[in-house]
Amino acid sequence: MEREPDGAARDEIGPPPEAGAVVLSSLRAALAAAEAALGQVDAPAERRESVRTARRELKSVRALAPLLRLRDDPASQASIDGVLEFSAKANQLLGPLRDRDALARSIQRLADRFADDETRRVTRTVLLATLVFAEADRRDDAQFAATAIERARRAIRQARAAIEHFDERRVSTGSNACAVLARAFDDCRDMLETALEDGDLAALHACRKHATFLALALRPFGRALPAPVRRARGRAKDLAAALGEDRDLAILDVEMRVARTRLVGSPLVSAIDEALKLARLEAFARAEDSARAFLRLGPNRTRRELRVLFEG
């Protein structure tokens, strides 16, 4: 596979002021949106949506920040390091809340696979009671959530303070944005090719990080993206979504061990297991299709248009 050159030639790649300004503005907006999302989260339903929004914005922050690294400016480098550190901390604090919400949504999707209304109701009720609400009974869930959210808000405020030390006058100087994106694109392609060739589901899931990064890092440019890059972003987004769906089902599969133990001998467990097995097969097929679609992208043209975007 033809690759982008390494070394000094890649270090010279950087965005023009307008591209750098878009990235910086979008990063600040994402941090502000993440903090605002966690402002009023008293009701459980409100809390779930707020956590989803905050984590989505924090993922954007972590995708955009590396594009602003200035190799020859220690102060700005420290600023970006601070943004990444505190946004990662906030994301980690919200992780358990998100995982529980994802488990509940996976249960709902699994229950919806049954044609009979009563079976859907019983499946949803039994699994929620066994896998979700039982966990809440073992701790003060509301207090746990409130503490995690408050600590996450403090971390986000620290990230917002860190970006204020970034030198806006040098937003494009020495930036390696194009090199970072090209490397992520190449790494994703290489990993996908190997995963599909070996039939390795774990390796395929390892690509999700790169796909998510590409989709979020390019999102601020919207329709201004050159067509090949816009297509690459769309396929990276589809790949990340398909792999995320399979990941959530895999978590449900692991958690089902609790239900199997408590409901041993119940015909409902066998029915749920069959439905879950089919759901995972379908999710994997969608992930595989998305991976093959990503690999059909023209690598040379995509890299060339990335340079157009960031170099003008």
Image (cartoon, helix red, strand yellow):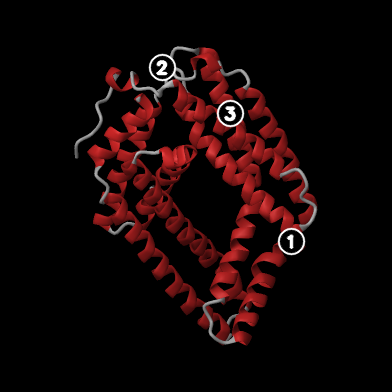
Label 3 SS = helix
Q: Are marks 3 and 1 in contact (CB under 8 Å)?
A: no
The residue under the point 30% across, 53% down is 195
Left/right of residue 256 with respect to residue 173 in the rendered view? right
Q: Amino acid at mark 2?
A: Gly
Left/right of residue 77 with respect to residue 3 in the rendered view? right
In depth, the one of 245 and 95 nearer the eye is: 245
Per the image, the residue denoted by label 1 is: 136
Per the image, the residue denoted by label 3 is: 83
- Mark identifier at residue 24: none
Q: Earlier in the sequence, mark 3 or mark 1?
A: 3
In depth, the one of 271 and 90 nearer the eye is: 90
Q: Amino acid at mark 3?
A: Val
Per the image, the residue denoted by label 2 is: 174
The residue under the point 72% across, 53% down is 47
Of circles 3 and 2, which is in front? 2
Near mark 2 (Cα within 10 A), the count class, few <14, some 14-19 or many ≥20, is some
The residue under the point 60% across, 73% down is 259
| Residue 1 sits in quarter | top left
Vertical comparison of 174 with 67: above or below: above
